[in-house]
Image: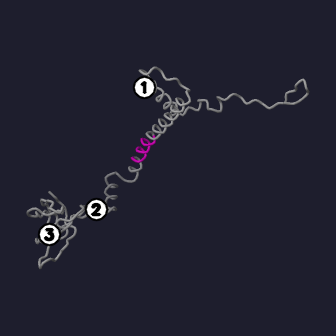
Amino acid sequence: MAEGVVQRHNEKHWNGKTFYSFALSGQDGWYNSGVKRPPAVGTSVRFTEKKNSKGYLEVDGSIEVLNDGETKSTSSLGSVIRAAAATGGGQSAYWDRKEARDITNDAARELGASRNTALSIIDLALKYEVVKLPAAAKREEFLWNLLDKYTKRLMSGDDEQETVQERKEPETTNEAVNTDEGEWN
């Protein structure tokens, strides 16, 4: 069953006869109606369709006219905006909804980025044997706990966490050392 508004007609003359087809608005393809003239452009119709032996769509039976020749008018953007503003959905409501949506999206992005970073850290730690995996039965639980630990640490944003630079041993100074032979090293 196909339903829609007739958008275009096509006529083909062959062997002294005129064959008709039409397209519906918003749908791909043409429907052949044979020698029967289809309803006027803009008419809302409903009909049964079938594919012929060549795979083309044909009207099977009669075409039911739902709305004779009248097209539904579409609202203009200005009227939609005015209606939204009149019902309390003006610009301020839009920005309030957008702000709430952005906060939710930012939190989800932060979680995703933290988890991805935690996975990279765990991958490197396992690759360079920084952590030792427990027995096979407890590996999955261990890895999930490790992932949660690093994700929480990355999301906390603690400034008190020591950085890699702070964990390094203090650099030694290149002072000259006097040996018994009187040479400087």
157 or 61: nearer the viewer: 61
- Residue, disc 1: 140
Q: Position of residue 39 (x, y in %)?
A: 14, 69
The numbered dot on residue 75 is 2
Q: Locate the C terminus by quadrant.
A: top right
The numbered dot on residue 39 is 3
The amino acid on which the numbered mark 3 sits, given as a three-letter code, is: Pro
Label 2: few (<14), some (14–19) or many (≥20) C-alpha neighbours in 10 Å: few
Dot placed on the residue nearer the N-terminal end, 1 or 2: 2
Q: Position of residue 24 (x, y in %)?
A: 21, 64
Secondary structure at badge 2 equals loop
Residue at point 34%, 51% (across, down): 89
Q: Is residue 175 left or right of residue 83?
A: right
Above-or-below relation of 84 to 128: below
Spot the residue most to the left: 61
The amino acid on which the numbered mark 2 sits, given as a three-letter code, is: Ser
Residue stretch rendered in magenta on the structure? 97-106
Disc 3 vs disc 1: which is toward the camera? 1
The amino acid on which the numbered mark 1 sits, given as a three-letter code, is: Glu
Disc 1 vs disc 2: which is toward the camera? 1
Q: Which picture quadrant has residue 63? A: bottom left
Above-or-below relation of 174 to 86: above
Residue at point 37%, 53% (across, down): 90
Q: Is residue 105 magenta?
A: yes
Marks 1 and 2 sit apart, C-alpha to C-alpha, by 57 Å
Marks 3 and 1 sit apart, C-alpha to C-alpha, by 67 Å
Residue at point 90%, 23% (across, down): 180
Label 1: few (<14), some (14–19) or many (≥20) C-alpha neighbours in 10 Å: few
Secondary structure at badge 1 equals helix
